[in-house]
Image (cartoon, rainbow, N blue to C red):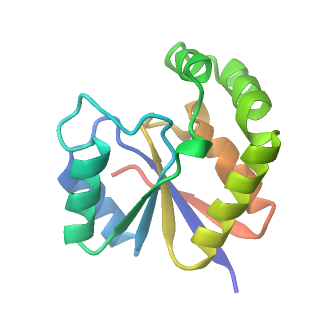
């Protein structure tokens, strides 16, 4: 049985289009992998987003431990995917706590259709690509959603 992991960035979306993309793909759980689940975009701060998604049948989990450190976010904004990847792996994923957080994400995603959320529209510029690659090594098929 193939398990599918979805990813999406909310850049350029509104909450309604995000939820429509998730439900249209059959996603039942959103795993927010932002270090800071706040946003200047209406509806994308943690509490508002969780309530809106749950009203539409999509559960919400904030996995702060899998977020990108500030330096990694700055590298992503500068379109330096290589630097972002190095910072993220060294500071988060390749640490003991990062490994445990990744295990927890894998367990969560194994329970049902799950989508990773961060800001960047293009997955190649976002740390969710690295998470997806690591879960692909554990047998997950990865599908990027764009809304």
* Residue at image location 79% in from the left, 66% down from the top: 138
Q: Nearer the viewer, residue 18 or 107?
A: 107
Query: In which quadrant of the rendered view does residue 110 lie?
Result: bottom right
In the rendered structure, the answer to whether residue 101 lies left or right of residue 77 reads: right
Tally the numbered discs.
0
Image position of 92 (left or right of 120): right
**Which residue appears at 63% of the width and 17% of the height?**
80
The residue depicted at 20 percent of the width and 44 percent of the height is 43
Q: Is residue 2 above or below residue 130?
A: below
Image position, residue 48 (x, y; %):
21, 50
Q: Nearer the viewer, residue 143 or 128?
A: 128
- Residue 114 in the image, given as x and y percentages of width and height: 50, 67
In the picture, measured across the screen, residue 50 lies left or right of residue 52, that is right
Q: Is residue 13 above or below residue 29?
A: above
Q: Where's residue 78, x and y in %?
A: 53, 12
Q: Residue furthest bottom?
A: 1
- Where, quadrant-wise, is the N terminus in this rendering? bottom right
Q: 33 or 79, which lies in front? A: 33
As displayed, is residue 60 above or below residue 35?
Answer: below
The extreme front residue here reads 97
Give the left or right position of residue 72, taking residue 64 as reference. right
Instruction: Work out whether residue 100 or residue 30 is closer to the camera in this orientation and state it.
Output: 100
- Quadrant of the image occupied by residue 142: bottom right
Q: Residue 72 at what x, y percent from top left? A: 61, 22
**Which residue is painted at 40% across and 49% down in the image?**
146
């Amino acid at each position: 049985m193939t398990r599918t992991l979805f990813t999406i960035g909310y850049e350029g979306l509104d909450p309604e289009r995000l939820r429509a993309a998730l439900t249209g793909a059959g996603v039942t759980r959103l795993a927010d992998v932002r270090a800071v689940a706040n946003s200047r975009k209406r509806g994308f701060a943690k509490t508002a987003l969780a309530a809106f998604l749950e009203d539409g049948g999509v559960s919400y989990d904030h996995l702060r431990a899998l977020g990108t450190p500030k330096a990694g976010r700055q590298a992503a904004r500068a379109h330096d995917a290589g630097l972002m990847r190095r910072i993220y792996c060294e500071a988060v994923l390749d640490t003991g706590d990062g490994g445990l957080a990744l295990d927890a994400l894998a367990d969560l995603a194994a329970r049902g259709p799950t989508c990773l959320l961060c800001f960047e529209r293009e997955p190649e510029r976002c740390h969710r690509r690295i998470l997806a690659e690591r879960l692909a090594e554990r047998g997950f098929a990865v599908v990027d959603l764009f809304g």
